[in-house]
Image: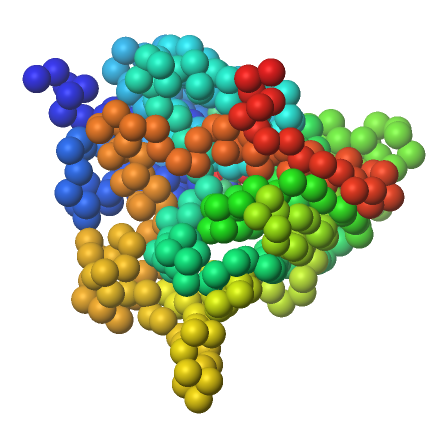
Amino acid sequence: MSTTDRELRVGMVGYAFMGAAHSQAWRTVNRVFDLPTRARMSLVCGRDAGKVADAADRLGWDAYTTDWRDLVASDDIDVVDVCTPGDSHAEIALAALAAGKHVLCEKPLANTISEARAMAAAAVTAQAAGVRSMCGFNYRRVPAVAMMRQLVADGRLGVIRHVRATYLQDWIVDPQFPLVWRLQRDRAGSGALGDIGAHIIDLTQYVTGQRITGVSAITETFVKERPLPAGSNGLAATVDGTAPAVDGADGHRPATGLVTVDDAAVFVARLDGGALATYEASRFATGRKNALRVEINGSLGTVAFDLERLNELEFYDATKPAAEQGFTRILVTEGEHPYMSAWWPPGHLIGYEHSFTHQARDFIEAVATGVDPAPSFVDGLQVQLVLDAVTRSAELGSSWTEVEPALATVAA
Ligand SMILES: NC(=O)c1ccc[n+]([C@@H]2O[C@H](COP(=O)([O-])OP(=O)(O)OC[C@H]3O[C@@H](n4cnc5c(N)ncnc54)[C@H](O)[C@@H]3O)[C@@H](O)[C@H]2O)c1
């Protein structure tokens, strides 16, 4: 048996927030789940040799490199895990697929429709050669979310009428918060919309099994200019288009740059099963730290999920006798619940990082058993098409904007 039959040798690009979360998952997954193949944390990539060496040691990687091209070209790597900002997803993932590596790529899949379409097309082509790819919408792997989908699929909610989704944060309420990459369109693609709105778009389409067919949107950038981060190369533009003072050298005012993404996006949508949906993504919801909430109302019942109480699901079963109706709080920690039999006795709670371990589990199992994991790059493109439609609708005074099925646009 060759090394690759026994192990999936993972190479991860980027080692900060998502890099740490994915490392936690790769470290844990084979110790918790009984899988046909082991993941080996072979190689991590970052651009600064000192920092990536430290990250490799701290996060548990065998070796490091400072160029993702070396990682992608290495004969000793089977899986490329892309944990960089959106501006490098397409280049790295396309090179990895071309080199025959399985790819796990963070969300949103890319920064533009054309990049996402190229990635989806490459992934479809690679499938024929047994090369797997997956987009990292990890919230699908929260057991309560997986159970929500099961309830819908089993018909327990009847016909879905309403989807109500919000994802609220407040980390840039302070106008002095610096102009980090997430606030720059060329690095991030969009703002709250693509960063957190993408999650609720994917999650609601996944749970309902329905696709968003059209949207009407408004977006806003409340703080239009921000201080450049310390050590910034000063590439961001100022409001008046002049070059910024890189280090605030005049001694009076810190150098600033334009915010080129949305701070908040709000939109209504139609789903192809007939449901009406509302979405809100904001980084200006003061007091809300990571408040992802979804409620789905059907003809036979309702389910509601709140990420800040991620072990719970609220379920209202309208088929019960009237005298017994009411919202039930289900603690999703039983062995019968998705993923939970591998963890602790009932009532012993899990957290945020477990969704990444479950993601790694599903990815390894799919690769080892030769099936395509979900969400696929085509699913990632579907979300990207919605993001693009929201942006265009907002630019055109909230005009109704249709969203095409992703697969049709890949084949075209
Ligand atoms: N699934 C989730 O819940 C979730 C949460 C946060 C971020 N994300 C996504 O993960 C991705 C990364 O976000 P983050 O929060 O980890 O960002 P981050 O800024 O914390 O980390 C980015 C990492 O990429 C590295 N990097 C950037 N360009 C590189 C290059 N060319 N070569 C090698 N390394 C490079 C940086 O050095 C850093 O280590 C984004 O696509 C983001 O949308 C997903």
Q: From the viewer's perspective, is residue 180 above or below residue 128?
A: below
Q: Is residue 379 left or right of residue 45?
A: right
Residue at left 33%, top 52%? 354
Q: Say which residue appears at 20% left-offset and 57% top-offset.
A: 341
* Quadrant in the picture for the C terminus: top right
Q: In the rendering, at what x and y percent does residue 180 appear?
A: 65, 40
Residue situated furthest bottom in the rendering: 323
Q: In this view, does 135 lie to the left or right of 128?
A: right
Does the image show residue 319?
A: yes
Please identify the quadrant where the N terminus is shown: top left
Give how far across and how far down residue 390 sits, in percent.
72, 41
Pick the residue in front: 406 or 345: 406
Q: Nearer the viewer, residue 65 or 380?
A: 380
The answer to which of 138 and 61 lies nearer the viewer is 138
Answer above or below: position of 88 versus 374: above
Q: Residue at x 53, y 50 (%)?
A: 204
* Residue 350, picture quadrant: bottom left
Q: Is residue 201 visible?
A: no
Residue 221 picture location, percent across and down:
78, 47
Residue lying furthest left: 1
Q: Image quarter for residue 246? A: top right
**Rendering quarter of residue 51:** top left
Q: Residue sitting at 64 percent across and 31 percent down? A: 404
Is 157 placed above or below 48 here? Answer: below
Residue 98 position in % (x across, y down): 42, 10
Snapshot colouring: rainbow
